[in-house]
Amino acid sequence: MPQAPASPVFFLSYAREDTKHAKYRELMKRFVDDLSAKVAIKMAVPLEGICFFDESSIETGTVWRNELAEALKLTPVAVTLYSPFYFNSSWCGKEFQVFLNRAAAGAAAHQVPIGIVPVLWSIGRKLPASVQAIQFKRLVRAARRFF
């Protein structure tokens, strides 16, 4: 029987503001569930523990909880949901920077690569210069259902 991975396979980095309304929260949960199922099937592992998806809120000035800090340290892939709210969130910026730093450190040490998989969650005016060089995936099919 396949065993669940020791740490999550991917970390979902998203802006809480993108889930304020029920239909958008449901869209995101469906996206996470579908992606988790696809990853579990491709890796031939149980669905449990595939994704780190933190639905709690971290208030300004609060120290990151242990499980969030551990997930940022151990999860090999960040799935970042690009949106105007994402780029205006200091917490999203911190999560993104942790993965950039880990990717650079891993490459320098010739370790297993750390990945960042950006997904264009909602359209803004223009991507910030800091992320323009990173190829992203458009989430067109799912977005058509709601927009």
Image (cartoon, rainbow, N blue to C red):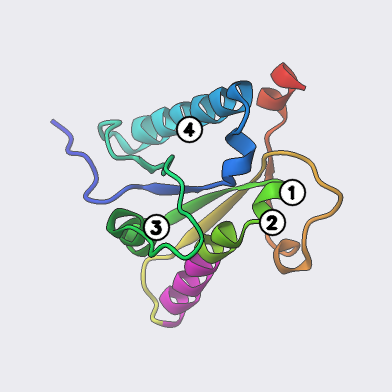
State the separation of the CA atoms marked 1 and 2.
Answer: 5 Å
SS category of the residue bearing label 4: helix
Mark nearer the N terminus (3 vs 1): 3
Q: Quadrant of residue 48?
A: top left
What residue is pinned by disc 1? 84
Q: Nearer the viewer, mark 2 or mark 4?
A: 2
Tag 1–tag 2 contact (CB < 8 Å): yes
State the separation of the CA atoms marked 4 and 3.
Answer: 17 Å
**Looking at the rendering, in which quadrant would you find the C terminus?**
top right
What residue is pinned by disc 3? 76
Q: Residues within 10 Å of mark 3 (few under 14, many from 20)?
A: many
User: Residue at 72% across / 68% down in the picture?
Assistant: 130
Mark nearer the N terminus (1 vs 4): 4
In the orientation shown, which residue stands out farthest toward the top?
A: 145
Q: Residues within 10 Å of mark 2 (few under 14, many from 20)?
A: some
Going by the image, does 12 lie left or right of 117? left
**Looking at the rendering, in which quadrant would you find the N terminus?**
top left
State the separation of the CA atoms marked 2 and 4.
Answer: 20 Å
Tag 3–tag 2 contact (CB < 8 Å): no
